[in-house]
Amino acid sequence: MGLALDISNLTVYYGEDCALKDISLQVEEREFLGIIGPNGGGKTTLLKAILGLVQPESGEIRIYGAAGTTARRSIGYVPQFSRFDRRFPISVEEVVLMGRLAGRSPWFLQFTNADRKLVDDLLERLEIAELKKRQIGQLSGGQLQRVLIARALAVEPRMLILDEPTASVDSASKTRIYEILKELNQEMTILIVTHDLSAVSSNIDRIACLNQQLYYHGRTEMEAGLVEQVYGCPVDLIAHGVPHRVLRRHEEAQH
Amino acid sequence: MEAILKYNFLQNAILAAVLASIACGVIGTYIMEKKLVMMSGGIAHTAFGGIGLGYFLKVEPIFTALGVSVVAALAVAALKRKAGTDSDLLIGMFWSLGMAMGVVFIAMTPGYPPDIASVLFGNILAVSRSDLRLILGLDILILVTVYALFQVFKAYIFDEEFSSVAGVPVRLLEYLMYILVAVTVVVMIRVVGIILVIALFTAPPAIAKQFTYDMKKIMGLSVLLGITFCLTGLWVSYTVRLASGASIVLVAVGAYALISLLRFGLRKRGGTSS
């Protein structure tokens, strides 16, 4: 299996501020990678760089061996649903059809019956077929999240990139969303930015810890010291009181 | 009714009202959803600089207004991207700069000062045949562009990032949208003038959105509402001899207030009885 994503020596600046410093990261095909790290640690910047939404200062990003706009066609992007204007005049079907814009000429673009069929199948698969004609303001957070996943799948991607997919979603929906992602992982590579460490531990193969630099990239169980280094806070906050452990059992810190 | 058949200027006014409302309803919907209201106000006011330039250069002011407002719109878009400056601040500066330039150009123009009031507040009863031809031409331009790019415009306004990743040319669409706003402003100058145009950009789509969540229907309904407001305003202005632009705006905003109050009242009553 080849590399789905190959980032080498990526550095990104926002004006004077260094957001990402010399990041190198390889993701195998069909890997399920979680990107964690503190707020402002550059997780979203990394996503945006992969998606071509910010210009890196230096470094290279290859997606399935290719770079640039065409390479990004193989990405299905699921943004945070909380940033949407819920009063926007658009139906579930119309949102998912947006995925079919990929790679098409924008002039006089009409969706075909094949497009609509694909959208129907995706809505079916994500168990939201009955919401097809609803305006997005009439959906719950979990439902909207699934709509956005369906839209990303409508691109027919080889890699799915999700930004905080379970933030402010109820726990039943959260479980279901991870089940769906697990299933999709059989067919495609999945990259996910999350705060939700319980989900990380029980679902995700590997993690990348990001705080301006890449601190750790490996199997989910990781060294306690590293998490402290990344988060700059006691590990207990993260490791204890969570049903599944992110971390190996470790000694209480000596104070 | 007799008057309409008798007077050419009334026929022109009615045609202008209909044509302007078409542009305004369609682009007003975009302005509302992309939250470009202040931007549109800024573009409208820079058009005044163009009007002044036209008088100064002795060319038809509406053409220079078109040129200047399109250039200003593109400049704001480009500066926003390049400098990362808040477009809010830029709009504020362009807003007054446009007006100031208009005043300066007109002051520098020898001879009698032109009728500024009709530019600022519109005079639909003074629309000429050649004005109508220009408005019709711009209307067609706007409608063809919106029709050709309808799906991608919707995607761009709803989610610029996703559209960009999907390869939709979002930057081109952004510039095009600003140009469309500038063109629509120029269409509206004759009808309600530079200062009052914002009311016709906002009131019809704001009312339409209370009744439907389908973008095409919001556009269609906005066009119909715009026509209704313009014709009612025209009638009011003709019968009680008020300025036409002001009458149209009063009718439009009045209708918005009335409809919102009625709906609010209904919802409240529905809420207490259940």
Image (spheres, coloured by chain):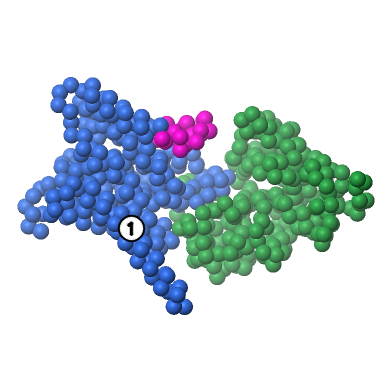
Chain colours: A green, B blue
In the rendered structure, the answer to whether residue B58 lies left or right of residue A11 reads: left
- Residue B148 seen: no
Residue at x-position 46% and y-position 38%: B88
Mark 1 closeness class: few <14, some 14–19, many ≥20 residues within 10 Å: some
In the rendered structure, the answer to whether residue B244 lies left or right of residue B267 reads: left
Residue under pointer 1: B256
Picture coordinates of residue A67 (x, y %)? 65, 37
In the rendered structure, the answer to whether residue B215 lies left or right of residue A246 reads: left
- Residue B83 seen: yes
Under tag 1, what secondary structure?
helix
Residue at x-position 28% and y-position 29%: B102
In the rendered structure, the answer to whether residue A80 lies left or right of residue A2 reads: left
Residue at x-position 19% and y-position 48%: B244
Residue at x-position 90% and y-position 48%: A253
Q: How many marks?
A: 1
Q: Is residue A193 magenta?
A: no
Q: Main secondary structure of the magenta part?
A: helix
Closer-to-camera residue (B198/A215): B198
Picture coordinates of residue B105 (x, y %)? 26, 25
Q: Is residue B83 magenta?
A: yes
What are the residue bounds of the magenta stretch? Answer: B73-92
Picture coordinates of residue B149 (x, y %)? 42, 48
Q: Chain of mark 1?
A: B
Picture coordinates of residue A141 (x, y %)? 60, 61
